[in-house]
Image: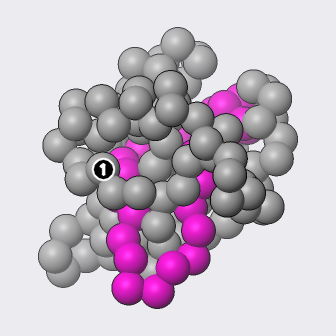
């Protein structure tokens, strides 16, 4: 088993980091792209995107394989320190689920918090990857 900084981890993205071009501009090499969804969560866009627990809901996104250093670069290195890493079970096809890392806001956005520009960009990103845009 490889315990080096080069070891890959599956990471689920549901916001603009789904776009592999954005990841590359951040110095990250996205590998092994797979579409998927998490059950029991819904997408919520405040200033930024997050997932909220919500029974009978699905949140869609992409899974990439990244090194831990790349994940750190995306979040801590970009000042997105309010996101925490947690594990989620992602359905990547009808009969297969995988455990992934996912960076999520610890505190949910307030009900009146929104970001129309972010939502518009996210909708285009979801369309680019043929994913349902469900808020």
Q: What's the magenta region? A: 49-75
- Residue 24: image location, x then y, percent: 48, 18
Residue at the image point whose x is 46% and y is 80% from the top: 40
Magenta segment includes 61: yes
**Residue at label 1?**
133
Q: In this rendering, would 95 be left or right of 67?
A: left
Quadrant of the snapshot with the N terminus: bottom right
- Along the line of sight, the residue nearer the viewer: 2 or 112: 112
Name the quadrant of the C terminus. bottom left
Please state which of residues 116 and 86 is positioned toward the viewer in this rendering.
116
Considering only vertical position in the picture, is 8 above or below 125? Answer: below
* Display colour scheme: one colour
Quick one: 102 or 2, which is closer to the camera?
Answer: 102
Residue 89 makes an appearance in the image? no
Q: Is residue 25 magenta?
A: no
Question: Which residue is at a point 78% across and 61% down the rendered structure image?
Answer: 106
Depicted 86 relative to depicted 109: above or below: below
Locate residue 98, reporting x and y percent: 39, 71
């Amino acid at each position: 088993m490889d315990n080096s900084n080069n070891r890959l981890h599956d990471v689920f993205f549901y916001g603009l980091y789904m776009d592999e071009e954005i990841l590359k501009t951040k110095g990250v090499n996205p590998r092994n792209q797979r579409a998927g969804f998490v059950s029991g969560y819904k997408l919520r866009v405040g200033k930024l995107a997050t997932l909220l627990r919500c029974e009978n809901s699905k949140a869609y996104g992409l899974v990439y394989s990244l090194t831990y250093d790349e994940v750190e670069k995306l979040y801590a290195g970009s000042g997105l320190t309010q996101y925490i890493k947690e594990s989620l079970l992602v359905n990547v096809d009808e009969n297969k689920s995988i455990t992934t890392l996912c960076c999520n806001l610890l505190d949910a956005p307030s009900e009146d918090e929104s970001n129309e520009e972010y939502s518009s960009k996210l909708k285009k990103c979801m369309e680019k990857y043929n994913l349902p845009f469900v808020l």
